[in-house]
Amino acid sequence: MYILNYSIICILFVFCQQVQQIVGISRASNELISSPIMLTVNENKIIQHNELPEVTNEVSVSLWLNIKMRDISWSCVFHKGGQDLVRTPSLWLTPAKSAPHVRFSLNDNSNAGIDSVGSGLLLNKWYHLAYTLSDPEKRSDFYIDGKWVGFQSIQPTEQIVFNDAPLYIGNDTFYNGITGLIRYVVIIKLTEL
């Protein structure tokens, strides 16, 4: 079922992008990075909140990642938030093994999410990573190369806390960034699908 949901999201994303092109809506509003960019631990790309699609209760982030070197500490892939524990949405890689670590903030837990997915990403290999977060559905899902690999349920009394801080891709001023290539970073407002 979850692979079907992932496939539907991908098909709807492509369909929405084609509709946007036909009616003249810029695709750039959702696609933040098109061509591969190389990042090192101290580099980042910062996208201001007003340059991002407006998100109030659901979001999906999709990207391609190719790590070139592991770090002995946490590595930030992306983090939307101006403070360490403002984390909606965020993705880090764990120390040493580079396992994806999906995070977001709730009204009663600023560090919620899906802990360490899998045994780690291999070096010099492209991975497609997709992260969905929905307050109405009360869940977060994470996919690697189209395979559903993790989820986190959110209690009915909890609410996801979205924020108006910048999106950091790579180093976020609190944690080192990844050393590697990143491309096709796309944010989709799920209510647009």
Image (cartoon, rainbow, N blue to C red):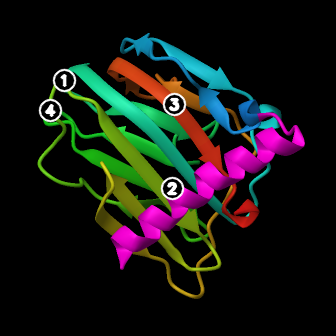
Classify residue 124 as left or right of residue 148.
left
Which callout, 3 or 2, points at the residue further toward the start of the chain? 2
What residue is shown with label 2?
10
Cα distance between the residues tagged 2 and 4: 24 Å
Name the mark on residue 184: 3
Are the residues flagged by discs 2 and 1 in contact, CB closer than 8 Å? no
What residue is shown with label 1?
70
Bin the neighbour count of mark 3 within 10 Å (Cα to Cα): few under 14, some 14-19, many 20 and up: some
Q: Which residues are magenta?
A: 1-26
Residue 28 rendering spot, x and y as whole percentages:
73, 30
Bin the neighbour count of mark 1 within 10 Å (Cα to Cα): few under 14, some 14-19, many 20 and up: many
Are the residues flagged by discs 4 and 1 in contact, CB closer than 8 Å? no
Closer to the camera: disc 3 or disc 4?
Answer: 3
Classify residue 163 as left or right of residue 171.
right
Closer to the camera: disc 2 or disc 4?
Answer: 2
Which callout, 3 or 4, points at the residue further toward the start of the chain? 4
Tell me which amino acid carries mark 1: Arg
